[in-house]
Amino acid sequence: MEEVYTVQQVAKKLQTNIAYIHQLRKAGLLQFLKLGQYKCLSSTLEKFLKKYEEYDLTSPKKIKKLDEAMNQTENIAITSFF
């Protein structure tokens, strides 16, 4: 049987906080099932990580490719400098 993770365990594995994991869940990006509390299958977490590799998920409702996010940050920094 594959491993099942709680929201807290997923947050620890991804080195983020519980509230952010719930944002991902509510946005439909990371699927959970509810067995008393929310649980995520290890295979689901792996698929999520592979699917969103090279993406900026800082804001789950405004997902961007990393290149786009980096370019926007660089443009802001250059504009602010001048």
Image (tube, rainbow, N blue to C red):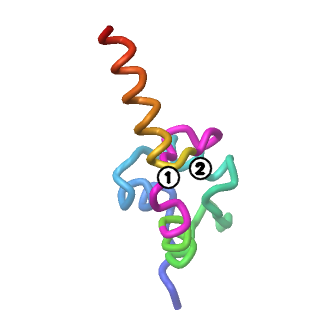
Q: Judge depth for marks 1 and 2 and give the one in front.
A: 1
x 42%, y 61%: residue = 9
Q: In which quarter of the image is residue 13?
A: bottom left
Q: In this view, does 55 lie to the left or right of 28?
A: left
Q: Residue 9 carries which label?
A: none
Residue 12 coordinates in the image, percent (x, y)? 36, 56
Find out whether residue 52 is within the magenta segment: yes
Residue 26 coordinates in the image, percent (x, y)? 68, 47
Position of 71 relative to 78 (above/below): below
Circles 1 and 2: CB distance less than 8 Å?
Answer: no
Mark 2, Cα crowd under 10 Å, few <14 / some 14-19 / many 20+, is some
Q: Which mark is residue 24?
A: 2
x 30%, y 12%: residue = 81
Q: How far is the residue under mark 1 from the one under mark 2? A: 14 Å
Position of 79 relative to 3 (above/below): above
Label 1 is placed on what type of residue?
Tyr
Q: Residue 55 carries which label?
A: 1
Magenta stretch in the rendered image: 50-63
**Magenta region's main secondary structure?**
loop
Circle 1 — which element?
Answer: strand
Residue 80 coordinates in the image, percent (x, y)? 36, 11
Q: Is residue 71 left or right of residue 78?
A: right
Q: Which of marks 1 and 2 is nearer the N terminus?
A: 2
Position of 36 relative to 69 (above/below): below
Mark 1, Cα crowd under 10 Å, few <14 / some 14-19 / many 20+, is some
Find out whether residue 44 is within the magenta segment: no
Q: Which of these two is toward me, 44 or 63?
A: 63
Label 2 is placed on what type of residue?
Leu
Position of 41 relative to 32 (above/below): below
Q: Which of these two is toward me, 17 or 37?
A: 17
